[in-house]
Image: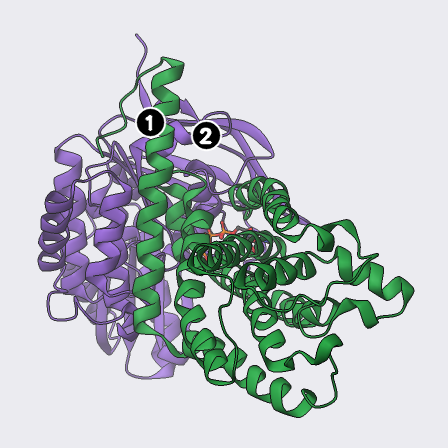
Amino acid sequence: MTTTYAVHSEGLEKRFGEVHALRGLDLAVPEGTICALLGPNGAGKSTAVRLLTTLITPDGGTARVAGHDVAKDPAAVRRVIGVTGQDASVDGDLSGRENLRLFARLQRLRGAEGRARADELLAEFGLVDAADRPVRTYSGGMRRRLDLAASLLIRPRVLFLDEPTTGLDPASRNRIWEAVRRLADRGTTVLLTTQYLEEADRLAGHVVLIDDGRASVTGTPAELKARIGRYAEAVVAEDAALPAAAMVLGQLAGAEAVLDPARRAAGAVTTDPTLTLPRIVRELDAAGIPVVDATLRPPTLDEVFLRLTAPKELVA
Amino acid sequence: MTIIAYDESKGARVALAGRAVVGDGWAMFGRHLQRLRRAPGLFILTQSMPVTMLLFFGYVFGSAVALAGGADYRAYLVPGLLVATAANGIMAGMFQAAADNHRGVMDRFRTLPMSRAAVPIGQAASEVAQAAIGLVPLAAVGYAVGWRIEGGFGPAVGAFGLLLLFRLATAWVGIWLGLAAKSEEAAGQLGGATFMLPMLSGAYIPTAGMTGWLRTVAEWNPISAVSAACRELFGNETAVTAGAAWPVAHPVVASVGWSLLLMAVCVPLAVRRYDKSTK
Ligand SMILES: Nc1ncnc2c1ncn2[C@@H]1O[C@H](COP(=O)(O)OP(=O)(O)OP(=O)(O)O)[C@@H](O)[C@H]1O
Ligand SMILES: [Mg+2]
């Protein structure tokens, strides 16, 4: 049986002078799914998106979007994709409404239809009050929302979103997530990049961890989380109690604890699914440790990378 | 405009592509007009420059330039300034194209299924529209300082048409150079230098009085041919003497030829450059 992939790349490479931004990226995103590319700064996420959306051409390897080769038939690719890049791609001197109407026309929406669709999106993204102001007077989050609205004028077959919710407030973030889910429900394939594990978790059926220009780990969010585990952390009242707290946490987690003396915190990653927060607090309390705060949460991206990627110098 | 269908026949593809160029180019033209309405400052400045130059050159240098037969220098200067203003298409085109090319919105245009030529075409069209508006104040002030249309209505319309055609051609030169420029600053410096071009032509002073090699250079400068053509069509003194180079001796044909030649070279270069930049 052959699966059709909406996005399929093999050995994708891109160099910018000395910088080897992508070193053989393999991606296979099935039609109608949401895939998240997760990675630290400089991992190559944006480069991958720019290659797949025909903005730059690869130095090696191949990539197909909805069956069309991005290097050989970019025009065909452009007909089936929607894109919101990492940087603003709307015209600052036009108003929000003028921007959307222009992009609607360029996507062959008829006059009245395009105007109606623009108004609909302005309402959906909370931009009605600012609709007739030049975009350069918008706040960063408003501009971001307009940028996202612009890629949703028509329902694309494949939607690319490069860090769609970076810099957005929680309400706007939820609105974006809803819009993305609705599109996916109607059959659009979505490839998004993010720095937030939570975002990948909430939206994506499939997560690809990009590190140093390659896909280092792939899987469903559940699989990834099972591999990553959770992060147990305790903050204590006095410095003297820190080593003891680290010892207790380490035993509970089954892994070595790390100390953060500045915050008087000790933490450890655990892959034990039965460990609970009450138990952590009880054990610490029983050991006579003055706990002032305790958490058991998914690890941050930094912690994920430290655990799942080969140990190397971290370039922030 | 209908949705681009997946029609494989070549004729249908060409027809669709043609419709896309016109429709998308028109949409991009609209974008430029909207931008202009929001930020008219630069437009007003560029329109008032030639009027200032007319008064400055006309009255400050006017007394120093003697034309054969005692013709009025200011009447001679007006058509030249109209042409010099049209030649500003290079500078304006460069500034605009270079600035636009570094705007984030270009990334969106490049990922939309629109015609690859639409962005430069929209800009060129907006340049011509601005130039057409700009002719009015300059011609009006020219009239006030003594310039007259003496060759009849038809030829005068021809002269204005020629001015707009030349503006279109120079705009394409500018758009190509602006897209090819490494940075906005580089485009700004090179564009500013094009201010010199009309000085090396018959726009402000007759080429007949220039020394040998300079005269040859000036007369092969397209601005000289267009200036002579406009003077001829407006019925003004052309100050073209025997022994002038071919383009100046046959100014109307040469002006159309120069314009078409510049476009034949620069339109494909500009469109290709637009398509390839950021790659
Ligand atoms: N146009 C360019 N010229 C030179 N180097 C570039 C260019 N674009 C990207 N790079 C380099 O390629 C590498 C990958 O960059 P990319 O933008 O893809 O990272 P990213 O994963 O999107 O990071 P971020 O999370 O910061 O957005 C980086 O080292 C970056 O400096
Ligand atoms: Mg990025």
User: Residue B143, relative to residue A58: is it above or below?
Assistant: below
The foreground one among A96 and B83 is B83
Note whether B95 is above or below A216 in the view shown. Answer: below
Indicate the position of residue A203 as horizontal and vertical percent values.
Answer: 21, 44
- How far across and down, in percent of the image, does residue A296 sit? 23, 59
Looking at the image, residue B68 sits to the left or right of residue A194; the answer is right
- Residue displayed at 30% across by 47% down: A229
Query: Can you tell which quarter of the image residue A288 is in?
Result: bottom left
Residue at 66% x, 48% y is B254
> Outermost residue toward the top?
A1
Mark sitting on residue A223: none
Q: Is residue B122 visible?
A: yes
**Subunit of label 2:** A
**Residues under labels 1 and 2: Cα distance?**
22 Å
Report the disc number at residue A70.
2
Q: Can residue A194 be seen?
A: no
Q: Position of residue A205 (x, y in %)?
A: 24, 36
The chain in green:
B
Question: Between residues A119 and B218, which one lies in front from this camera angle?
Answer: B218
Amino acid at pointer 1? Leu
- Residue that numbered label 1 is attached to: B16
Which secondary structure, mark 2? loop
Chain corresponding to purple in the figure: A
Residue A56 location (% of width, % of height): 51, 41
In the rendered image, which quarter contains the N terminus of chain B? top left
Q: Amino acid at mark 2?
A: Val
Is residue B197 positioned above or below A302 on the image?
below
| Callout 1–callout 2 Cβ contact below 8 Å | no
- Left or right of A282? Residue B83 is right
Nearest the viewer among B19 and B218 is B218
Same chain under badges 1 and 2? The reply is no
Chain name for mark 1: B
